[in-house]
């Protein structure tokens, strides 16, 4: 994680969370059933991206105070 800039990791994790949430919510609204395994994979992807988003957000906002 040291080689990746916080803004890049923040953007990627935000994009992953957004796409996964959209897929799950749109299929739920439409009433289309997606396979259970796909829902679980999307949920795990969100769970992995969430701590990355939190960590990079803290890194970005604490870095601003020092400048």
Image: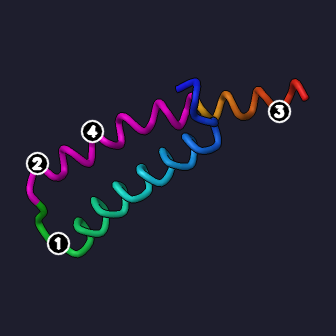
| Residue 64: image tag | 3
Asked if the residue under mark 1 is in contact with the one under mark 2, i.e. CB atoms within 8 Å, the reply is: no
Residue holding disc 2: 37
Q: Is residue 66 left or right of residue 33?
A: right
Give how far apart the Cα atoms at labels 4 and 2 are.
10 Å
Q: Which residue is drawn at 23% across and 68% down?
A: 27
Residue holding disc 1: 31
Badge 1 element: loop
Q: Is residue 33 left or right of residue 47?
A: left
Badge 2 element: helix
Give how far apart the Cα atoms at labels 2 and 1 are.
17 Å
Which portion, as a residue range, is magenta?
35-55
Give how far apart the Cα atoms at labels 3 and 1 are.
44 Å
Asked if the residue under mark 1 is in contact with the one under mark 4, i.e. CB atoms within 8 Å, the reply is: no
Q: Which of marks 4 and 2 is nearer the N terminus?
A: 2
Asked if the residue under mark 3 is in contact with the one under mark 4, i.e. CB atoms within 8 Å, the reply is: no
Badge 4 element: helix
Instruction: Estimate how packed mark 3 is, as few (under 14), some (14 to 19) or many (20 or more) residues with alpha carbons within 10 Å.
Output: few
User: Does 2 sit above or below residue 20?
Assistant: above
Residue 11 inside the magenta-drawn segment: no
Q: Which of marks 4 and 1 is in front?
A: 4
| Residue 61: image tag | none
Location of residue 5 in the rendering, given as x and y in whole percent from the top left corner:
63, 36
Instruction: Estimate how packed mark 4 is, as few (under 14), some (14 to 19) or many (20 or more) residues with alpha carbons within 10 Å.
Output: few
Give how far apart the Cα atoms at labels 4 and 3 are.
31 Å
Q: Which residue is drawn at 50% across and 48% down?
A: 12
The part of the image, by quadrant, that contains residue 67 is: top right
Q: Which of marks 3 and 1 is in front?
A: 3
């Amino acid at each position: 994680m040291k080689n990746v800039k916080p803004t890049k990791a923040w953007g990627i994790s935000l994009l992953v969370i957004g796409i996964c949430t959209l897929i799950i919510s749109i299929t739920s609204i439409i009433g289309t059933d997606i396979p259970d395994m796909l829902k679980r994979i999307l949920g795990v992807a969100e769970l992995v991206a969430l701590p990355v988003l939190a960590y990079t957000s803290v890194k970005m906002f604490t870095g601003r105070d020092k400048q």
